Amino acid sequence: MSDFEPKIVAFVCNWCTYAGADLTGTSRIKYASNVKIIRFPCTGRIDFMLLLKAFSNGADGIIVSGCHPNDCHYTSGNFHAKRRWIMFKELMDFMGIDMSRITFSWVSAAEGARWAEVVNTTVTRIRELGPYVSYKELVNKSVEEEVKNG
Amino acid sequence: MDNLILRAKELLENKTVQVVIGYEAGPTGVVRPAFISDPANADSLIYDERCVQNLAVYLTKPEVKHLGRIAIVSSLPVMRSIMMLISEQQISYDEIVVLGISADGVLLDIADLSVMQGYIDKSDLSNPVKYKELLAELKKLTPAEKFEYWQKELSKCIKCYACRQACPMCYCTRCTVEVNQPQWISVQSNAHGNMEWHILRAMHLAGRCISCGECGRACPVGIPCHLLTMHLTDQVYNYFKVYAGTSEKMNSVMSTYEPNDKESFIV
Amino acid sequence: MKFGIYPGCSLTGSARDYNESVFAIAEAFGLEFTQIPDWNCCGATAAHNLNKELSLALPARILALAEKNGLEEIIVPCAACYSRLVVTQHELKKDPELKNRICEVIEMDYRGTSVILNVIEWIDKYIIPKLEEKIVKPFNHKVACYYGCLLVRPDKILNYDRAEDPQTLDIVMSKIGAAPVDYPFKTECCGAGLSISRTDIVSKLSGKIIEDAEHRGAEAIIVACPMCHSNLDMRRPDINKYWKAKYKIPVIFVTQAIGLAIGLPAEKVGLKRHFVEVKIS
Amino acid sequence: MARIGVFVCHCGENISATVDCGKVAETIGNLKHVAYSTEYKYMCSDPGQTLIKDAIKEHNLTGVVVSACSPRMHEPTFRKACAEGGLNPFLCEMANLREHCSWVHEKNELTTEKAIDIVRTQVEKVKLNSALQPIKVPVTKTAMVIGGGIAGIQSALDIANTGHKVIMIERSPSIGGHMSQLSETFPTLDCSQCILTPRMVEVAQHPNITLYTYAEVESVEGFIGNFKVKVRKKAKSLDEKACTGCGLCTTKCPQKKIPNEFEQGMGMRPAIYVPFPQAVPNRPVIDRENCTYYIKGKCKICEIVCPTKAIRFDQPDEILELEIGAIVVATGFDIKHADFFPEYGHGRYKDIIDGLQFERLASASGPTAGVIKRPSDGEIPKNIVFIACAGSRDPAKGIAYCSKICCMYTAKHAMLYKHKVHEGKAHVFYMDIRSGGKNYDEFVRRAIEEDHVNYIRGRVSTVFERDGKLIVKGVDTLLGAQQVEIVADMVVLATAGVASSGAEDLAQKLHVSYDSHKFFAEAHPKLKPVETNTAGIFLAGACQNPKDIPDAVSQASGAAVKVAALFSQSELTREPLVAIVNRTSPPTYSTCVGCFMCQSVCPYQAIEREEFKARDGKVVKTVAKINEGLCQGCGTCVALCRSKSIDLLGYSNTQVYAEVVALLNEY
C-alpha cells in the first residue's frame, strides 16, 4: 500500500479557499500533489451530487472548503452550504458511506499555511484508509452489468 | 364516518367544492382513493385504519386541479403536506377545503388555515413509533453493516420511481433524474445508480419530508426508502429544532440558516 | 396541586423565625406545604467553590426527590438555596451530557420539571391575589427593602428581578401599606458567609446598610434571606461596637410583615426570636 | 466542433522549474478537440498575448486555455487578449499551474502529471463555455440621501457638486441632526452651530438638492441604478410657500409645556414650533399629538394670528414616488436613555443627566444660555462627576462595543465645565481613555494637565442621592482597586451610542443587513466600509456605528464618491456570470415549478416572479426569474434547485460536472 497515491478532488470557493491556496503558492509552502482543485464561486454553489460524482469517477478523497462563517463574499452562501453538508453527512453516515473520506473545512484567503495543512492531513488520512475499494467496486459492478445488458 | 359523508355531501351540494378526495373500498375490498364529484356517490366514503395513503399527492396534479375546488380527507400527514405545499406556493388554501380527521378517526372542524395550524401545533410531529424503532435498529449497525444493508436493499430497485410519484412533496414537473445535460443519475437500474437516486431523493426531501411513509408503502419491491427521509427528518429536528409542514411561511430548513448552526465536522 | 417546600439548613436553625412566619401566613391563606422528604444540603456557598459536579449533584438530588414525590412547584424561602436550585436547573438543562452524569451520581432520575419559587414569587402568585381582603392592620411604616445578593443573582439565570435596583420586594411591601424609602443599599454586600470567620468585615459592611436605612427614616429593614437577617440582626451588637453607634432599627422578614398586616400575633410569626427588639407592629 | 488552443506558460522559471511544460503542451496537444497547443516563456508579456491573438485567427479557435498563474491574477489580462483576437472573452479559461502546482510541489513526474490534469480539466470546461455578453443596466442619475445630519449633509453636498440631482429626506422638521445640538466640538472647541449652519443653508439653497423634511421612507423597490422609492411627507399643517417664517404663531400658541426634543427635554416648546432658531427650513410644523385643536377640536389661534394665512389644519400626508439611482443611508444614532442603568439613577434624580443634555446646558443657545446650572434647582454645581462608558463595553448590559465618541466628548465636557466654573471640581470615571485621532490625545492631556480634571480609572457601581447630594461610589483601579466615594452636585453619564430608532425598520425596507445592535452592516468590514451588501446603497456616518464628526464626514464623502462613480456611467456594465432560470416552450414555459425556495436562499433579493398568462389573461404558471442587475453569481440557488431549472453562467452544471470527470479520468 506504500506506493498508493490517492486521488483527491478539492471543491473550493473562489474568494477564500481558492485565494488561500494561491497564497500557499506565493508563500512557496509545499504540500502533497494528490489534491486537485475545482473552483466554484461559492460553497453555496457546490451541489452534493458533485461529491458523489467525484467518488464514482475514482476519487479516494474529497476536500470541500470555503470562507469561514460570517466571511462569505456573498454573505450567506457558506451558511447554506453548512446546512447542506450537515444533512448530507447524516445521510451518508446512515447509509454506511465513509464520510472520513471527505474533509470539510473553512480556509480563508489569508490561511495559506492552513491550506497546506488541510491538504496534507487529508492526504495522510486517505493514504491510511487506502483506495476507496467499496465504492469503486460498486461502480465497476454497475458498469459491468450495463455492458452485459447492452 | 357518517359525519364525513354528510359533510362531503353538503360541500358538493352547495357547490363549495367540485370534488371530494377521500378513500373508498374497491370491489375486492381494497382501499383506494376516491374522487367524488356527485353528492350521490359520497356514501362510498370510508375512513378507518386502512386509509393511510397520503392523498395530498393529488393536490398538485393538473388533472385534479382542473376539476375545481377540492375537499380533501386529511389525516395529520395530509395536513402537514398541505402546509408544505402552501409554503412552497404550489397550492393556495383558498383552493381547498380540509376535511381533517383526528388520530382517533374523528372528523375535525378545520374552519380555516389557522385552525389547521393549531391542530398541527399540538400534534406529535416526530416520526411514527413503528418507524422510530426501525431507525433505532439501523443506527446500531456498524458502517460496514449499514453499507451492506442498504446495498442489499437498493440493489432491488427497478427505478420505477413509484416512491417519487407517491410523495406529495415530489411535485416537480421535471425531476433531476430526467436531466441528461449532464446525466446526473444513470438511466438504467444498477447498484450504483440506484444508490445515487435514493441519496438524491432523500436530500431533496431533507427538511420537507412530513413522515407519512408513503414512499416506502408505494415501493413495489419493498425497499424501506422512507427510512432515509425519516432519518433526515429526525436529524433536521435534532439540529434545527423544526419539523416540516408546520407553517405556511417559507421556512424550509435547506433554504434558510442560522449563523450559529452547530456542526462538529468542519475543520 | 401538591406544593413542596425546601427548608434548607437555615430555616430549621438560625432562621426559625422565618420558617414560622412562612408557615403562619401559608396557613392563614389556606396554603399547604409538603416538605421534600429526605432532603439534603443545597451545597450553599461552599460546594461550587470546590467541586462543580458536587455543587450540582446536591441540588439535583433535591429536585429529583421533588419530582419523584410529584411536587410540581416548590417554594424555597432561603435565597441561597433558591439561587443554587435555579442555577442547577439551568446548568443541567443547558448540558444534557452533564445531566446524565449527575443522574448517575445521584442514582436518580432528574428531568428538571419542577417550578422553583423564591418567597417573593410565591407571595406574588398565591398571597397577593387574596391579600387585600385579609389586611386588618396595614403595615403603615417607612421601610428599607434589602434584597442582598442571592435573591437576584446571577440575574441572567434567575431571570427574576433586575440585579441592580430590584423592585419586587418594594412592590410587595407597598401592597401591605408600607412606604419603601429610596434605598441605594438594596443589593450592597452584607458580608454574607464571613459572618462566622470575619465578623469585623460583616460589622463594617452591614453597618453601612443599617446606617443608610436609619438615615432615610426607615422604621424597619425588610429582608427575604436568612443570611441577610442574621448578619443585620444577630450581629447588631458587633456592628454597633464597630461603628460606635446605637442602631436600633429592626430587621423583619417580608413574611413577618405580611403576618402582622393580616393580624397574626407577633409570636406566631417568630418576631419574639429576634436579637434586635421589634417594637413596631 | 470545438477547436481549443492551449498556451502553457513557463512564467520565467516559476513554472518550468518543477513542471515539464513541454510535456504538458505535448500531451494536451494530443487531446481530442485541441487544435493548437504550445508553450512560451511569458504568456502575459506582449509577445505572449500576441501569440494567443494570432493563434485564434490562424487556427480558428473556439476556446482558449492559458495555463499559467492564478486566474485571480491574470484572468482579465487574457480575456482581454482573446477579445482583441476576436474571440468572446468568456471563451477563455485559465489553468492555475503556478500557485496551485509548480510553487507548491517538488520537481517530479507527479507534479507534471498534476499539471496535465489541471489543464485537461480546463480544456473540458472551456469546451462547454458559451459566449457571454456583458450585462448593461441603465442608471437613473438622482441620488437619495436619507437623514439630514452632518453625514447626510456632507454626502448630499458632495454629490450635488458633481452635478447630479440629490433628494434629501429628513424625518424631523429640520436638518442638522445631533451636531446641531452640540455646544463646542473636540478637539478644537469651535462652536458646532457656527460650522454646521452654513452647510445646512447650502443644502437648502443648492440648485441640485431637493429637501424634504418631516418625511420618511415608505418603501423601496428595484435595484442599483433603478430604485423606486415611496416617501411619506408628513403633514406639517402648513402651506410652506405662504409661510414667511415670521414666528408669530409659535409665540401665540397657548400650549407651551411640551418637552423640547432639541433641548433633550431640558426646555419646553409650543405645539406649533420651529425646533431651533437656526433650523432649515425655518418654517414651523404643528405637532398634532400635542396640539389643542387636534386634541379638543378647538383653538386655531395660530390660524387667527398668521398674517399670511398659511396654516392648513386639514392638510393630509403626501406620498411621493421617486425614481432613484443610488441611496446614501445617513440616519445617525441615538443615545441610550433613562431606565437602562437603574443603579446610576438616571431618570430618578434630576441632576443626573446624559451627555447630550450636558451639550445643551453648555450651549450658548441652550436653555441656560450656556451657564452650567443643575436641573433640580438651577444652582451651579461645584462638584461634577462624569461617567464615561455608561453602558458601552458592558456585555452584561447587552452593549459589548465601544461607543467611540464618549472618551473625547467627556474630556470636552469636563474642560467646558472647568472653563465656565473655575473653582469647580470635575471628576471623570473611565475604563480606558480611547483618544486615537488627530490632536485627540493632546486634547485629553490638556483636560487633565491644564484644566486639572480629576481622572479616575475605574467603574462606578452606583449613584444615589443622600441629603440632597449625589453620592458616586466607584473604584480606582490604579490605586489597587480602592473604593472611591465622591459627593457630587451633578453627574453626567456618557451613555452608549445606539442605533437610531427605526433603523431596523428602514434596513428591512432597503433590504440592507444590520448587526445585532441594529446598526447598518457594511459590505466588507475592511475594504467595503461604505457599501452595503445591496448594490447601489451606501452608508454614511453613525448609522453604521457610533462615529465622531470627522469620521462621519469622511465616510459621507466616501459614499458620495461611490455615488458619483456610479453616476459617471450612463449604463452599468457587469460581468455576466449570473444565474438564469431556464425557459421552455409553452405550456411548460420553464421546468421551474415555482416553489420559490431559491427566493429565501438568495442573499440579494435577485429572484423575482414571472407570470405566464393564457390568452384570457389568466395566470397559468408562475416561475422564478433572476434579475441580472441584482444577481451576484454566487450560485447557491443553483445547488438548491431540485429540478435543476437554474443554472449559473460560467459555472454551469455541465461545466462543473465535466471538470470533475476530466480531473479524475485520463483520456
Image: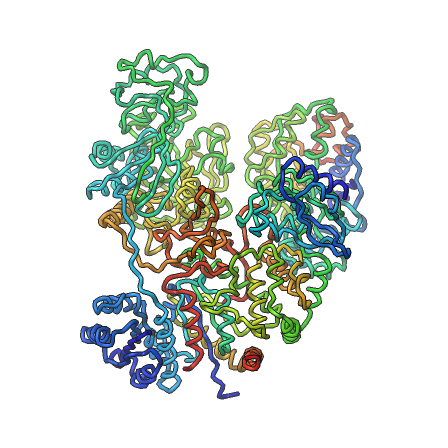
Horizontal side, residue C26 vs residue D291: left or right: right
Query: Where does the N terminus of chain D fall, quadrant-wise?
Result: bottom left
What is the basis of the colouring in this image? rainbow
Query: Where does the C terminus of chain D fall, quadrant-wise?
Result: bottom left
Q: Position of residue D411 (x, y in %)?
A: 33, 41
Horizontal side, residue B24 vs residue D549: left or right: right
Position above or below: D266 against D514: above
Q: Position of residue D532 (x, y in %)?
A: 36, 49
Q: Position of residue D213 (x, y in %)?
A: 32, 31
Q: Quadrant of residue B109?
A: top right
Counting the numbered discs, the total is 0
Q: Position of residue D194 (x, y in %)?
A: 23, 33
Position above or below: D78 against A7: above
Horizontal side, residue B143 vs residue D119: left or right: right
The reply to whether residue A85 is in sight is: yes
Along the viewing direction, whichever of D602 and C187 lies nearer the viewer: D602
Along the viewing direction, whichever of D169 and A117 lies nearer the viewer: D169
The reply to whether residue C248 is in sight is: no
**Residue drawn where x is 73% and y is 60% of the image:** B130
Along the viewing direction, whichever of D396 and B110 lies nearer the viewer: B110
Q: Quadrant of residue D550?
A: top left
